[in-house]
Amino acid sequence: MNEIKQVKVEARNLTKKFGDLLVLDNISFDVMKGEFLCIVGPTGCGKTTFLNCLTKIFDVTKGDILVDGKPIDCKVNNISYILQETSTMPWLTVEQNIRFGLEIKKEKEELINERVEEMLEIVGLKEFRNYYPNQLSISMIQRTVIARAFATYPELLLMDEPYGQLDIELRFRLEDELIKLWKKTGTTVIFITHNVEEAVYLAERVMVLTNKPTTVKEILPCDLPRPRDVASKEFVELRNEVTDLIKWW
């Protein structure tokens, strides 16, 4: 018997204008609880604008964004946001960076210690726990950022092209760790990328946006077995299908 999934995030008639520039044009879609959704689309189509509306950095012009059926509220909802830019705090060690969100939420010390050890183990940084960001490689810094984001077991994690500056080998390594953390925590993930192969490698569904004024062009299921084989016929076919949908015309 198939489990009935609950809707976690609802975008309803979401519209965003900057002056006379219409960026998001009456967008509606659902994200299921615990889902890993990747969003792709032409460069500059408004993918980051959508995330900024979701976190209330931007006010929407029209429409609603609901979490568990209620208007999103960053003071109530447990949301983590990983930006394109490196966001470790350079004056804190790896361990202190990972502890940060848990301490802000005033979690019990026992839980904090347990979560930190768990995260360090999954991302392979136990030996580097007392290192500062300037002593780490780019991939280690990104692992620290991801571990910090997952440490609070957020109900919703937003990721805006977090691996954009990394080479392909490092991407795949970090993506595998990301999947482990997602499965461990049950977090709902919305992941923005311009890399189609990355989207197909990670997602349960891939949402393709149009060029501005942006609407949802199509949402494709991505039910390939994990770990995914990027050379398999099924993977290549789905990657090509998404690529064709992103074309500007």
Image (tube, rainbow, N blue to C red):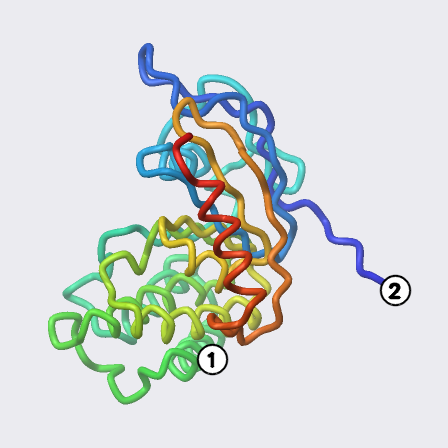
- State the residue at coordinates (53%, 72%): 232
**Residue occupied by mark 1:** 114
Q: Tell me which label, 2 or 1, sits earlier in the chain.
A: 2
What residue is pinned by disc 2? 1
Vertically, is 148 above or below 14?
Answer: below
Where residue 243 appears, as percent x and y from the top left, is 45, 48
The answer for how far apart the CA atoms under marks 2 and 1 are is: 35 Å
Crowding at mark 2 (Cα within 10 Å: few <14, some 14-19, many 20+): few
Residue depicted at x 41% and y 40% = 41
Q: Are marks 2 and 1 in contact (CB under 8 Å)?
A: no
Q: Amino acid at mark 2?
A: Met
Q: Is residue 46 left or right of residue 37?
A: left
Foreground pick, 112 / 196: 196
User: In the rendered image, which quarter contains the C terminus?
Assistant: top left
Find residue 120 and report its horizontal and vertical position in percent.
37, 80
Q: Position of residue 82 (x, y in %)?
A: 35, 54
Residue at left 45%, top 23%? 60
Q: Is residue 187 above or below residue 243?
A: below
Q: If the image is split into quadrants, where does the N terminus sit? A: bottom right
Residue ranking furthest to the right: 1
Tell which tag, 2 or 1, sits nearer the viewer. 2
Left or right of residue 201, residue 70 in this image: right
Q: Secondary structure at mark 1?
A: helix
- The x, y position of residue 62, in whole percent, is 50, 18
